[in-house]
Amino acid sequence: MNDTEDKPDINHLDHPADIADRLQEIPVEDAVSVIRELPTETASEVLSELDEDVAAGITAQMTPEEIGELLEEMPHDEAADIAAELPPEQRYEVLSHIDPEESAQVAELMRYPEDSAGGIMSDEFIVLPDDITIEEALKRVRQDEDADEDIEGVSYIYVRDRNNKLAGVVTIRDLVFRHPKRMIRDILKPDVQYVRVDDDQEKVARIFQQYHFMALPVIESDGRLVGMVEANQVIDIIQEEATEDMQLMVGLSGEENTFTPWNKAIYKRLPWLYVNLATAFLAAAVVGLFEGTIARWTTLAVFLPIVAGQGGNAGMQTLTVIIRGMALGEIEGKAGRKALFKESMLGLLNGLAVGLVVGIIGYAWKGSFLLGIVVSIAMFLNMFAAALSGVMIPFFLKSLKIDPALASSIFLTTVTDVAGFFFFLGIAAIAMGMVGM
Amino acid sequence: MNDTEDKPDINHLDHPADIADRLQEIPVEDAVSVIRELPTETASEVLSELDEDVAAGITAQMTPEEIGELLEEMPHDEAADIAAELPPEQRYEVLSHIDPEESAQVAELMRYPEDSAGGIMSDEFIVLPDDITIEEALKRVRQDEDADEDIEGVSYIYVRDRNNKLAGVVTIRDLVFRHPKRMIRDILKPDVQYVRVDDDQEKVARIFQQYHFMALPVIESDGRLVGMVEANQVIDIIQEEATEDMQLMVGLSGEENTFTPWNKAIYKRLPWLYVNLATAFLAAAVVGLFEGTIARWTTLAVFLPIVAGQGGNAGMQTLTVIIRGMALGEIEGKAGRKALFKESMLGLLNGLAVGLVVGIIGYAWKGSFLLGIVVSIAMFLNMFAAALSGVMIPFFLKSLKIDPALASSIFLTTVTDVAGFFFFLGIAAIAMGMVGM
């Protein structure tokens, strides 16, 4: 690919998020040269909009000076995210090229784990002391605004007391429409809901979802206000968490996306495929127990995929509802028992409905009434087992403090395969003994 | 369960969202009596926080007057959502109990489909004409504020021209810190990004995610500003869309949750289980083709679940990455081909890695070199087929304008079962012929 083929796509007047999208589709070398040609401010915004893996690929080909220049333009929290992905030796060199005060603030934010409230918060917000007048407050807000035009989405302004602790919140409107000589402490709304720096981002997202806040303050363990999280940032977190759940279920890393290079993805996928293999051998061993039975009646082998496939699908339906319900905070207290009841009912009824049909088709296809009965009962039992394990596997993982989604579909199909084959071949063996086959 | 057991849980000083959570865990009759005892404003907020199914169960036991009283307290968009769930006859009676002006506004919002921008927007926002001064604007904002204290999260104020079309946006700060005699039209920021009433909510969510807005105006087809969507509302939509994708994949409705009654869930789940059954019979038919082969070598039956299970799991990994990538807008333009390349590579390499191990274990377990070779090759081919179909199934569904997630795991396991059994038993039959088994 040559330059003239790719470059015309990128217009520096486009929104940085759109430029970032297009850079993700072209070779890294070309992306680097596009970034170098963009105005610094745009380039910096583009870099922070890029997928993590792609951004890391691009910075790997830039000098510490160049990276430093871009980080300096970014909000501190975004600079901290990029810097955290750099190899340690490069990281310190990059930070040494940034204005020391900025660099200290970036380093400060890097202390927090990526998926904690501290890791996602912004440190750019307005905070006012509680012992000034509204008039004075407006003056400070105005100065702050001149310093940073980004702080305009939300109209909440936090208030600290003389110990630097979060004392309350006021809105710009309060400042504009109330008497200018009143003290901030007299007009603030106390009892602001907040999160702590070490709260998990999933908890933060849950609070936004439950109470529909536009922003939440973040405090340190000593009560100091150190940052804020806004609703628009939470959108990304919620997408991340949903991606994680979907991926963990099937044995992916939880962090893979379309841009993850295959040589990175394979290290996460292959181990779970081996786990799945081990569980598949478990199911095979159950079939192995009944090799003699199958040798006497080969048609049984034909029905193995039906028993396993139906159990697996029904179980996945239950599992998906439960794991999603847990992620959304639906399943708490008595809701857990309610869910078990509902899924058991569905297991029994779907088991009856499917078992009956499978039995009839089995009889019609192979002309054996015995086969119809056996596959019917096995299917019914397996669908019920699928429902129970679809509820119990995530609860069990959760009780071990493991993410309830983790490899849950692998564990589920183990149960439905093992139980399904055991029911089907076991009942067949008994029935064959009874009729003297 | 008696009253004294449940009632003490509910404290009307709690946040309505928390009260709603607890009402979802108790019998509907008890929930209705709790709602009746709450102050009207709280009761109204609780009702709009409830899960749709639970809310419908509760309103079914209330009189139109009671429901009307609660709807009157709600923001119009939330009242519209509740009213839309009422049976039509009851709906008109309820609306007739509401102040006619309010009722008209609610009815207006009910015209828009539930999952469109019009269906999710709020009609409570401040709009200023462009031909007034800042001084006059501030006066109007102040009056608006007195009328509705809810409009305080976002500091965006939209501006309309003399034809009522969206002309731009100003912030509260602009009004406060600029010269009071300047005209709004001279300070507004034009070229505001907006959505149209009939845009799908998924598109709206995508725009918020891409550009990190705090709010977006919604316009009618004639350019009139009719509502706004805020980032905190988008959080719910994103959760809904993620739930939908996860559920559709395994043959659920996309709208089921822990609170969906079993007798409603079964109508959605059972049809897909029957679809899965039909595809399972397809896989069984492939095994049926080789019944003679299995009769001669029963051990083959033991390896059926391994071939199918591994293909299914590997395919689900690919499918999950692709469907999620589509939902997040990652897979567009050249990214689709990149994804196919990546997944093919992973299919080949994981296929080699797993095929080899399965072959060795097969040989070690059953002492047959032939079995090891056959299962090894079949596994390799099936893992590659799994990767290809994991990419191609969602692209195929999308090209038919069907949701790419719809029942995709059912289709995928059909491919991996059918292809896996065909490779495995077919190669076995050929190999057995060659060695004269």
Image: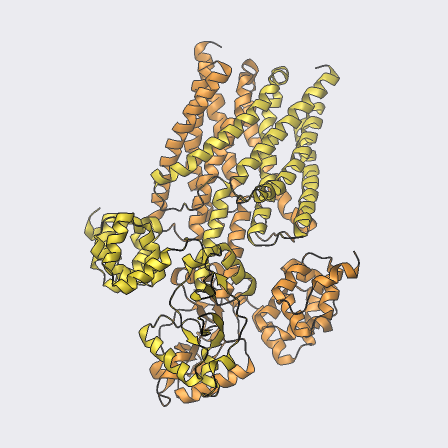
Chain colours: A orange, B yellow
Comparing A391 with B69, the one in front is B69
- Which corner quadrant holds the C terminus of chain B? top right
Residue B188 % position (x, y): 51, 78
Comparing A180 with B7, the one in front is A180
Residue farthest toward the top in the current orientation of the protein: A436
Residue farthest toward the bottom in the current orientation of the protein: A181
Residue at x 45%, y 15% (from the top left corner): A370
Residue A217 % position (x, y): 45, 71
Residue farthest toward the front in the current orientation of the protein: B163
Q: Is residue B284 left or right of residue A314?
A: right
Query: In this figure, what is the number of numbered marks?
Result: 0
Instruction: Answer above or below: position of A205 versus B399.
Output: below
Residue B424 % position (x, y): 65, 26
User: Is residue B262 visible to the viewer in this orientation of the structure?
Assistant: yes
Q: Is residue B23 left or right of residue B112?
A: left
Residue A319 % position (x, y): 46, 42
The quarter of the displayed image where residue A82 is located: bottom right
Comparing B374 with A51, the one in front is A51
Residue at x 55%, y 21% (from the top left corner): A301
Residue at x 65%, y 33% (from the top left corner): B382
Instruction: Answer above or below: position of A184 versus A82.
Output: below
User: Is residue B73 visible to the viewer in this orientation of the structure?
Assistant: no
Q: Is residue A380 left or right of residue B190?
A: left
Instruction: Answer above or below: position of B71 versus A412.
Output: below
Comparing A16 with B137, the one in front is B137
